[in-house]
Image: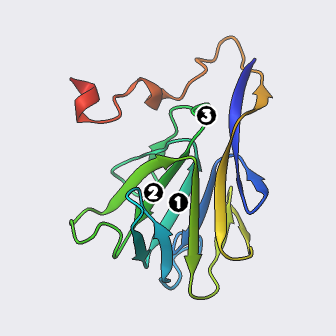
Amino acid sequence: MRVVDLAEVNGRVFVNSVSLGVYAEAGGEALGLRWTGVAGRVHRTSAVVLVFNDRYRVGRVLGSGSCPRLDAGVLGVTVLGVGMAGGSGKRFVEWSAFSFEVDFDGPVAVGIDGEALGLDLPLRVGSRPAVLGVWIALQHLGAASSAAMPAGPGDAI
């Protein structure tokens, strides 16, 4: 048996992710989401904000990626789209945090583990470390294949 994390958004527990913006709208109209980045600076984006239960490694192809572990006790935050990287030219930024808050100017679709919902504003997301015991079959590796991959160029050396 292993103990893994869960996460919550406005008190609602989730296992995998919360999606906001175009992704949650399944390609709908872009919105003005407001969120605070790592350095405490407020940003705006008009595309996608994804918050994962533990750090997520975004793949090069849209929709690809993997969560190497579910017991790190943090959220993985990924933001894609206009205005998210301060003009750096990056397509997305990602980081880990214990909590995350996002607000917006009007109604926005929220996808929680694939279910479309409406929640009160602002959205407050937090990690709930080591709260769920799970049984893993003996023949299973017990980790995603991405857990063996280096997290970045520095880790590969």
Q: The residue tagged with tag 1: helix, strand or loop? A: strand
- Give residue 118's position: percent from left, percent from top: 74, 75
Classify 132 as above or below 51: above
Q: The residue tagged with tag 3: helix, strand or loop? A: loop
What is the quadrant of residue 114 in the picture?
bottom right
Residue at the location (33% across, 29% down)? 150
Q: Mark 1 points at which residue?
A: 50
CA gap, disc 1 to disc 3?
16 Å
For label 3, the crowd category at 10 Å Cα-Cα, with few meaning under 14, some 14 to 19 and many 20 or more, is many
Q: Name the residue under label 2.
A: 78
Q: The residue tagged with tag 2: helix, strand or loop? A: strand
Task: Tell me the amino acid under the disc marked 3.
Answer: Leu
Q: Mark 3 points at which residue?
A: 70
- Give residue 88's position: percent from left, percent from top: 21, 65
- Give residue 51's position: percent from left, percent from top: 56, 56
Task: Tell me the amino acid under the disc marked 2.
Answer: Thr
CA gap, disc 3 to disc 2?
16 Å
Q: Tell which residue pokes out farthest to the bottom in this image.
A: 106
Q: In which quarter of the image is the C terminus?
A: top left
Mark closest to the chain's N terminus, 3 or 2: 3
| Residue contact between numbered discs 1 and 2, judged by CB atoms under 8 Å | yes
Mark closest to the chain's N terminus, 1 or 3: 1
